[in-house]
């Protein structure tokens, strides 16, 4: 489907979204949302056509991310007004998912979540890079609030279907070596303009494994490696880069202090204080943050398997989670969840309710596809039929918002 749909005027969003919800029986078709990063090099595995890698212009950088079911704006310099926002498409028209939730929040995300947050408070993405991302952290809620933002805990899963190659560095530095001092990190910031400021000398790299994942609490340093990553997270785009040179490319100081109060831009002690020190120097970091899939037997059956791929809590809170549903050829099942989710198809073809599912081989910028769906609270709780109509497994990833699952596994439960 080419992207020829016209944008619905805000005054008419209410009527449009009600028609779309009724026609889709609670399912909404979403269109691809592409995001560039000026400081990174695209990994070229997220199906975007090669001629469109720089669709926003070379000055904006290559497109290395696709965002799913997002009501969160991308915090990029020189951004277009709707950058990062997902669109609902129906009947040759479209509106942002953010506007749709504002108009029909109870039907789309559930009354409890809408009354508490007033929005869909999470999003997910594929991020796909040729090499590593600079060692950075996302501010916690307390520090982000000082600049009018929210904190950003996040999680990773490495889908095998999007990782046919490792690219340049399939290892991720996470946290800091136990015994590291704040003075050592401060010294790295003092050395920012000397070339490589040495922050990775204080950290530890973990080899990335397809089909596994990690939880990354806010305030924890991490330098994601070059596997294509599915990343459910809180609905925020705050960050601070702590590494001054990556693969020979200089990282500007402005990306360290992007979400720091202006009067603190040269306050090294404040910048270091944003780190959750205890979690960074955790002697059992992998044990407390590493995830492997867990089969949800209650939601699996003949020919179909539902697996937890993101689970656990952060500081005792269930902020987001994700599952991977696999159906063998000819199989069908009724998918029933206690909350809304954003779905992306990563292999095969089939249908979900009345909507077709098709995994594209290549996507032109602006093209509308059949691989992404929002499963509203209304549809999720009633149950929706999913069927594999193809000759290979049909695989879909879906992520959920906060406090949805009463039976969410704990980190480490895969070892049972």
Image (cartoon, rainbow, N blue to C red):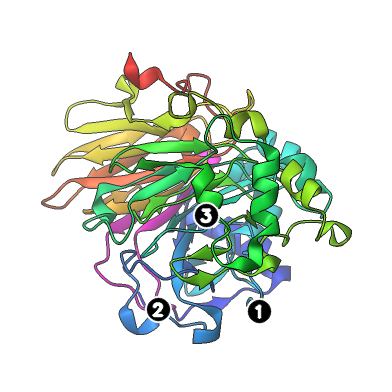
Q: Look at the numbered disc 2 and give the secondary structure of its residue.
A: loop
Looking at the rendered image, the quarter that the N terminus falls into is bottom left
User: Which residue shows up at 31% across the image and 64% down it?
Assistant: 45
What is the x, y in percent for residue 310?
A: 44, 35
Relative to 364, does residue 71 appear above or below in the rendering?
above
Residue projecting furthest to the left: 391
Q: Of the numbered discs in the image, which one, if any, rests on residue 53?
A: 2
Q: Quadrant of residue 83?
A: bottom right
Relative to 47, does residue 224 appear above or below in the rendering?
above
What is the x, y in percent for residue 273?
A: 75, 42
- Between the C-alphas of marks 1 and 2, the distance is 17 Å
Residue 259 shown left or right of residue 390 in the figure = right
Q: Look at the numbered disc 1 and give the secondary structure of its residue.
A: loop
Q: Quadrant of residue 176?
A: top right
Q: Earlier in the sequence, mark 1 or mark 2?
A: 2
Q: Earlier in the sequence, mark 2 or mark 3?
A: 2
Q: Earlier in the sequence, mark 3 or mark 1?
A: 3
Residue tagged by mark 3?
69
User: Which residue shows up at 34% across the image and 64% down it?
Assistant: 46
Of 106 and 392, the residue lying toward us: 392
* Residue 87 in view here: no
User: Which residue shows up at 27% across the image and 60% down it?
Assistant: 359
Q: Look at the numbered disc 3 and give the secondary structure of its residue.
A: loop
The answer to whether residue 414 is magenta is: no
Residue projecting furthest to the right: 263
Residue tagged by mark 1?
78
Mark 3 or 1, which is nearer the eye? Answer: 1
Q: Which residues are magenta?
A: 354-379
Q: Quadrant of residue 44?
A: bottom left
């Amino acid at each position: 489907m080419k992207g020829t749909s016209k944008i619905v005027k805000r005054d008419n969003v209410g009527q449009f979204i009600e028609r779309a919800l009724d026609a889709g029986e609670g399912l909404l078709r979403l269109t691809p949302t592409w995001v560039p990063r000026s400081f990174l090099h695209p990994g070229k595995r997220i199906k975007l056509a090669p001629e469109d890698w720089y669709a926003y212009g070379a000055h904006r950088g290559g497109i290395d991310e696709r965002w799913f079911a997002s009501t969160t704006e991308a915090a990029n310099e020189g951004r277009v007004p709707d950058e990062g926002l997902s669109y609902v498409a129906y009947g040759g028209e479209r509106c942002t998912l953010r506007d749709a939730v504002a108009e029909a929040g109870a039907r789309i995300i559930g009354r409890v979540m809408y009354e508490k947050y007033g929005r869909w408070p999470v999003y997910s993405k594929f991020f796909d890079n040729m090499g590593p991302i600079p060692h950075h952290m996302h501010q916690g809620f307390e520090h982000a609030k000082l600049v009018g933002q929210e904190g950003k805990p996040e999680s990773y899963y490495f889908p095998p279907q999007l990782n046919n190659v490792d690219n340049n560095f399939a290892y991720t530095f996470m946290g800091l070596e136990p015994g590291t001092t704040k003075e050592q990190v401060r010294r790295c910031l003092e050395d920012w303009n000397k070339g490589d400021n040495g922050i990775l000398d204080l950290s530890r790299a973990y080899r990335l494994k397809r089909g596994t994942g990690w939880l990354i609490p806010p305030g924890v340093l991490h330098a994601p490696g070059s596997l294509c990553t599915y990343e459910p997270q809180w609905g925020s785009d705050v960050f601070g880069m702590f590494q001054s040179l990556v693969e020979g490319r200089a990282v500007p100081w402005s990306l360290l202090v992007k979400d720091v109060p202006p009067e603190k831009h040269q306050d090294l002690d404040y910048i270091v204080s944003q780190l959750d020190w205890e979690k960074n120097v955790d002697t059992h970091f992998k044990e407390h943050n590493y995830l492997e899939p867990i089969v949800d037997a209650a939601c699996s059956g003949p020919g179909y398997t539902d697996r937890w791929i993101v689970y656990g809590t952060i500081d005792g809170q269930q902020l987001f989670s994700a599952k991977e549903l696999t159906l063998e050829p000819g199989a069908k099942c009724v998918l029933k969840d206690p909350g809304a989710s954003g779905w992306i198809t990563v292999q095969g073809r089939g249908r979900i309710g009345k909507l077709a599912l098709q995994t594209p081989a290549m996507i032109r910028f602006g093209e509308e596809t059949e691989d992404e769906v929002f499963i509203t609270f209304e549809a999720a709780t009633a149950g929706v039929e999913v069927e594999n109509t193809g000759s290979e497994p049909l695989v879909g990833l879906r992520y959920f918002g906060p406090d949805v699952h009463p039976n969410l596994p704990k980190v480490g439960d895969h070892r049972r």
